[in-house]
Every structure is written in C-alpha cells, then in structure tokens.
Amino acid sequence: MQSVTFQVPGKPQGKARAKTVRNKSTGNIHSYTPEKDMLYENYIKAQFQNRANGFYLERGKPVMLRIIARFLPPKSVSKKRQLDMLEGRELPLKKPDIDNIVKVVADALNGVAYHDDTQIAMVIAAKTYSAMEGLDITVEEYVG
C-alpha cells in the first residue's frame, strides 16, 4: 500500500468561507479564496512535497486521509488540567472545526498527492492537545 506521512508545524487552521464581492461598475459577482487560506494550503503542499518522493495517486484510485490536529493547551488553565489535556483526558472543543481542517488539507493536496479530491473515499480526523502544535497527515491509497 502506497502512503506518505508528513507534518505541518504551527497552529492548525481551518478553511474559511470563500469571499464574495460585487464589482460596482459591471455588477458582476465574483468569489475568491482568502489569502490566508491560500498561504496555508501552499504551506501544507510544500510539506507534502518535501516527503512525497514522487508519490501520486492517479485518477480512479481511492484515497484515505488521516489527519491529527495538535493544539497547545491554554496557558490560563491549571497544571493539573494541562496534564489532563496532554494525556488525552480532555479534548479541544474549540475552533477550527474538524471539517474545516479536513477541507483545507484536502484542497491543498488536490492535484499534488492525488488527481482530484473526489477520490477521497475515507477520512480519519481528530483534534488533540499536545506539547507541539501542528498537523500530522497521512495520505494513502484506500484498499477497503
């Protein structure tokens, strides 16, 4: 089974909604992806390419994504609660939403790790606390 595992350092971000604007002179409506999202997607793509060694799932091959989003415990909580968070007894119930994290990863790897994100057949995603924030991502061919 083909797979690539890589990390994206830094605070996990979710995909924001597309911005829609109307051109006052022509009346045309146009949507675009916010620059912050584009930069984060390019960062994910670069981290993947550093580890890929030519990995690419052609059209027609099903894809499985595994994503672990790691967040730092808040500094404002007690040491005992921080320990509970780091040991997995308390999970991050905060933004970004897990579905938006999945979306930004899927869009970033579109055309780079696989032909199109319609190939994604299974996603396993979780949010957790950790001493180091970031994303742990595995892209693999799904074999059921």
Image (cartoon, helix red, strand yellow):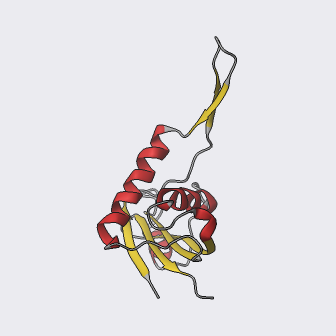
Q: Residue at x 37, y 54 (%)?
A: 43
Residue 10 visible in the picture = no
On the rendered structure, is 82 left or right of 18? Answer: left
Residue 142 visible in the picture = yes
On the rendered structure, is 74 left or right of 19? Answer: left
Residue sitting nearer the eye, 107 or 71? 107
Q: Residue furthest front?
A: 59
From what the image shows, is residue 19 above or below residue 42? above
From what the image shows, is residue 53 above or below residue 16? below
In terms of image quadrants, where is residue 8?
bottom left
Q: Position of residue 74 (x, y in %)?
A: 46, 59
Q: Position of residue 55 (x, y in %)?
A: 39, 74
Q: Residue at x 47, y 88 (%)?
A: 1
In terms of image quadrants, where is residue 28?
top right
Residue sitting nearer the eye, 99 or 111? 111
Residue sitting nearer the eye, 91 or 78? 91
For the image shown, how many numbered marks are present on the structure?
Answer: 0
Q: Position of residue 76 (x, y in %)?
A: 46, 56
Q: Residue at x 63, y 30 (%)?
A: 30
Q: Residue furthest top?
A: 25
Q: Which quadrant of the rendered structure holds the C terminus?
A: bottom right
Q: Position of residue 111 (x, y in %)?
A: 48, 60
